[in-house]
Image: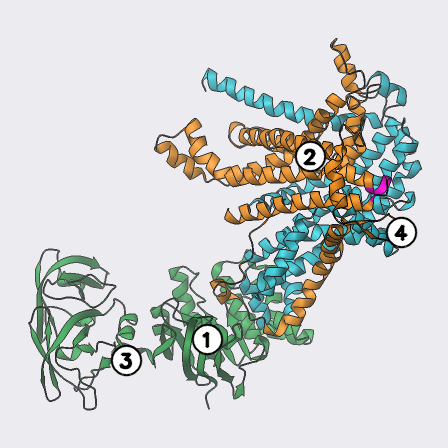
Chain colours: A cyan, B green, C orange
Amino acid sequence: MTLRSRTVAIGLHAVVSLWTLFVLLPVFVMVISAFKSQAELFTRPLALPKQFSFAAFERAWGIGISGFLFNSLLVTALSVTIIIFASSLAAYILARSDRPVMRWVYVAIVAGFAVPLQSVMVPLYQLVSGAGLLNSRLAIALPYAAYGIPFTTMLFYAFFLEFPRELEEAARLDGCGRLEVFFRIVLPLSGPAIASGAIFQAVFNWNEFILALLMLTKSDVRTLPVGIYGLTGQYSADWPALMAGLSIATLPLIVIFLLAQRHFVRSLAGLGK
Amino acid sequence: MSHLEVRDVVKRYGQLTVLSGVSFAAQRGEFVVMVGPSGCGKSTLLRSIAGLEEISSGSVSIAGHDITAAEPSDRGVAMVFQNYALYPHMTVAQNMGFALKVARRPRSEIDAAVTRAAEILRITDHLGKYPKALSGGQKQRVAIGRAITRAPEVFLFDEPLSNLDAALRSQMRIELSRLHRELGATMLYVTHDQTEAMTMADRIIVMNGGNIEQIGSPLDLYNRPATRFVAGFIGSPRMNFIAARVVRLSGRTVGLSLGEGRPLLDLEFAPGETLPVLGDAVTLGIRPEALGDGGEIHLADAEVAVVEALGRETLVYSDAHTLRTTDSESLDGYFAALVPSQSDKRPGQRVSLRADRSAFVVFAADGATLHDASPVHHE
Amino acid sequence: MPLPPTPTITGTSSARRPALTAGSLTATAMMAPALILIGVFILIPAVVAVIGSFFDFSMTSANWTYVGGDNYRRAVTDPLFWLAISNNVFIVVGSVISQVGGGAILAAILDRGIRRGNVVYRTIIFMPVVISSIAVAFVWMLILDPNVGPLNAVVKALGLPTPRLGWLGDPSISLWMLLLIAAWQNVGFQMMLILAGLQAIPREHYEAASLDGARGLKAFWYITLPGIRNVLVLATLITVIGGFKVFDLVFVTTGGGPANATQVLGTYTYTQAFAFGNMGYANAMAVVLLVTAVLLGWLQVRLSRRA
């Protein structure tokens, strides 16, 4: 290697390393701050805590994080399940039917993809409150599912186009009806698409804020993001407890991301086509 | 009564007609092979019989039942696919027993059927494996086993050997023939490979452009092709096709000239055959094994252009300037002769192209065979 | 978000499709859950938002008063509406430069320049994408806090001046801080998208080009750039749409302040609707966002179809 190309290589490494450090720093601050006392946070903001104290976690847990965590798990699991079932079924029909009406179905799904949640918050709020479903964790899973379906349907659609038709034909000859072909052959072999779709939507719904802000007004039904947001009014000065709460809200996703990175990146790359 | 009967089947996709009124029947226990170039409609016909395609008109019946509108699984057929189509998430045994499981048959019956099929195909050791652990040949056996467990009236094969390498393919051909004998089942087999058709079939159906060109036993098709298309498709190396013109008519004898006015060839045609008229362009067909430097008729002088040693025999391509071909797949003036290996031909050598009168087949301009008066010689 | 190809509904490929006749009722039933959810929670509310923008009503009352185009006229003369729009545009332009530009640079380096540690870098840089914007907002509020924040501590230690009103409290700085935080969170997403595009370019193209004498910048110009053009367009559109939709981050960090300096369409619509109860006016602004997003989405479909 020449001296020049060596310098270039070091320069390139430096750029990437600097951005990597910049990305890590806030995460680092969040985690170490959660183990500090209020005073230590103030005096030594960037240092590791002198001793790792779980006091902030206990405070956070005590003022509601445990309930938020449960609510988030419930809402996310429910909405992701609905999304996977509804999207895979719709995408399968879309990929296998050649009836002209499917063009309109596709347009409806794409349109659903383009509408920003922020632009319908007033009618959506009135719809949900009018139906008496404010503060229902089960009810909020439905709009969550609705907003996840267009993207996931298109993900499954691309997957099903590649799915070998012979397997479905063999199953039809073996006596399966349309639903049986789907549930006994197609769905069990859609693991990669299910994983990509589920992880993507789990992250999205776990983090969702606006809908939760509008519809979950009581503290005991709130999910993590809006629950923590609600707490900051009362406990504004308690940074360590806030950071502890955010760590609890964030770390599960980071762990899932690290374990299932492959699927996450696939749904990104697959749809970039 | 025929076991499988296909009557006037038409299949259209919008403007495109894929099958234009196809009819044939297969007897119980018969091995029928459908052969033809890609796009000829043979796969569509097979899939229509399986119920995977809806036909535009016509009817299909199996064992006396009209199954034109039946669900694929209610037709009494089983199908072996080109790409095996084994369910990747099921073991070999589960793959083979799936149809019976869907039909909610008792466990013991499923096990018995799977065990028996596995024994016939000698795959008992692989029953617990998943398809991805199997070789191509083993996968194809499992696919066949899956068909056997269903004990269908008719087995359908869609180019099942085309994904295998040459050695395995010839071995599987033998296996399939053995299987057909042992099971005594009616089988309908689609392929584009005329060797498979010739070696396995009781009867061959040659298809072209959505129509049946000819149905017959392998040797029938070889010796008495009904059309130029069949003559070209069946037999390897391919038949030579020489352009000719009718220059003389007397009674049932037709005088043909090849190339530039000569040589003249007199052929007598069978009574009842519609004779060509003076000036008609016709095609003279000669199989490579019938062309050589011996024989009653001298066709042309030629120069050896290419010599392919095949081992037992040698294929000699000679360039005869005076002759033209009507075959779009051959070069003008190049004609193939299959000669014994010891004949020692070299490129550049002068040869005389000769053949016996009985070896000629004449095709009219529309491709139909004109049968000659002399009884066709049998091999 | 990117889109997969449109389905070929007519066409010759139908030759391989199994017959559908028997299952059309089943097919409708299989389609129903998705279509009902999309219809009830997305499409119908969108239509209602458009209708509602011509009425005046409050959150609690069922009385809708028809006001024609008043809500839109009000928006045109409302300086805060224009401030919000201009802030959105600022964020859009800044995000395209920082996020698509930064993502492209990082992707290019990771694709060709660096072999060691590639996966580690990629993983870490992408990580913020999975963190909720609420968490991102609060952590950055701590970092930028004028009293306890580490940034102030560091800047002071270097002997440099710190903004008197705080990094988020100073109207001349706060928008830039939002850009920085948004870049922190989203550069990884763009990097991955562009990296996937770069890696889809066959290596043989570079080899063929180098045999033809095109290396370095020439190869970049003739091979790389045409190869990722579509991905770059897609990344830009995603960023533009995201810039118009921005809400969580602004809502939590500044709430649109100080003194409306960081107000964007999303937060201003929310404020008008749920703080002031001007539902009709909020709807009119929501429709502006809706139309913008649908137009951009349509463009995205058009472009990805051509790709």
Q: Which residues are magenta?
A: C273-278
Question: Which label sits in the foreground, 4 or 3?
Answer: 4
Circle 2 marks a residue in which chain? C
**Residue at the farthest top position:** C159
Neighbours of disc 2 within 10 Å: few (<14), some (14-19), many (20+): many
Query: Which quadrant of the figure contains the C terminus of chain B?
Result: bottom left
**Residue B75, image x and y in percent?**
56, 80
Q: Are marks 3 and 2 on the same chain?
A: no
Give the residue pinned by disc 3: B226
Q: Residue at x 18, y 75 (%)?
A: B282
**Residue A239, image x and y in percent?**
86, 27
Circle 3 marks a residue in which chain? B
Give the residue pinned by disc 1: B11
Q: How many marks?
A: 4
Whether residues under marks 2 and 4 lie with C-beta atoms below 8 angstroms apart, the answer is: no
Circle 1 marks a residue in which chain? B
Identity, as a three-letter code, of the amino acid under mark 4: Ser
